[in-house]
Image (cartoon, rainbow, N blue to C red):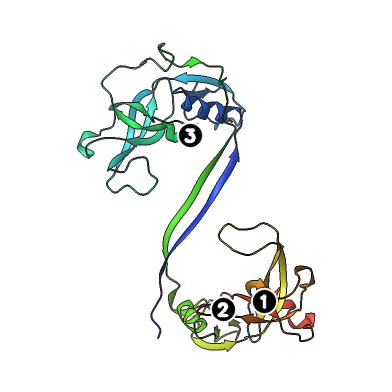
Amino acid sequence: MPDVLSAPLVVEFPFTRSLGPVQSAFLTGLRERVVLGVRTTDGRTLVPPVEYDPVTAEEIRDLVEVAPTGTVTTWAWNHAPRRGQPLTTPFAWVLVRLDGADTALLHALDAPGPDAVRTGMRVRVRWAEERTGAITDIACFEPYDGEAGEPGATGKSVRAGGHSGVFGDPITGIVAPARLDYTYSPGRAQSAYIEALSARRTVGERCPSCRKVYVPPRGACPTCGVATAEQVEVGPRGTVTTFCIVNIKAKNLDIEVPYVYAHIALDGADLALHARIGGIPYDQVRMGLRVAPVWTEGARYPDHYRPTGEPDAAYETYKELL
């Protein structure tokens, strides 16, 4: 039995969204050291603000300025901060109900240790030195001994006062980087599949019940629900079952657009895998096209598949693999 493989993987992409009038005012306000909430028709003040009442679903736009001071309603200690978190030293995640608000805001509290944090403690905003119109304009919260209604950025006492939400150069959109770091272990079946690929062989597993051969193998038949163990070498040639034309260039792929990504049913397999098609103009790729893998030196998997020159496969031979 081959060793089970594992590898660190990162899924990362920039999430871009436009802002409506409420979120635009909230983020622009943070840039100006003003914390805004929104007032519902029943008089509750929601911070952070939302565009629709979570109870009635009614659209709400009545903006309210609240104080940058508040009370911790609950908390949890973070003893090992991760990359991208508000602080690089251990801190507390806290829910803070700002003075003048009826809901709590989640952020970090800079405290020397968990013994210094408690529910009900008073805190205030520590503003970031450079502010751009993002939640990170609040660098964190810090302990505070004062009373409610600390003067806001304008110098006046802030106790849930109305606000126009009008600022110069408003923030109209944001780009939030999304990233997930994790360790992936393919398991016994897929580890054997990957090891075979390093020898330029494609190996699947046959179900002992329905006799279908799955590539890549899953370790169990998704139809019958029984374990699979019998290895079957398939391909290397196959048939294009379906495909799409890619017109948007990916940042991490040095491939010129347009190009074709296809589902390919390898000879002897009962499940199509996906791969790029090369060696042919994108507008000549078609269902039934017979293809073979193209390997590059040192690669653990085919770089792409190219036409073999054989006659196209009859639709009846692959219609169940679409």
Q: Earlier in the sequence, mark 3 or mark 1?
A: 3
Residue 142, image x and y in percent? Answer: 30, 29
Q: Earlier in the sequence, mark 3 or mark 2?
A: 3
Which element carries disc 3, helix, strand or loop? loop
Q: Earlier in the sequence, mark 1 or mark 2?
A: 1
User: What's under tag 2, amino acid-wise?
Assistant: Thr
Q: Which residue is mark 1?
A: 264
Which element carries disc 1, helix, strand or loop? strand
User: Which residue appears at 52% of the width and 27% of the height?
Assistant: 28
User: Which residue appears at 71% of the width and 65% of the height?
Assistant: 244
Q: Which residue is mark 3?
A: 134
Considering every residue shown, the one lying at the far left of the view is: 115
Camera-near label (1 vs 2) is 2
Q: Are marks 3 and 1 in contact (CB under 8 Å)?
A: no
Give the crowd class for mark 1: few <14, some 14-19, many >=20 residues within 10 Å. Answer: many
Residue 181, image x and y in percent? Answer: 43, 57
User: What's under tag 3, amino acid-wise?
Assistant: Ala
Residue 149, image x and y in percent? Answer: 37, 15
Q: CA distance from mark 3 to mark 1?
A: 45 Å
Whether residue 43 is visible to the viewer of this picture, yes or no, is: no
Image quarter of the C terminus: bottom right
Q: Nearer the viewer, residue 144 or 289?
A: 289
Q: Nearer the viewer, residue 81 or 46?
A: 81
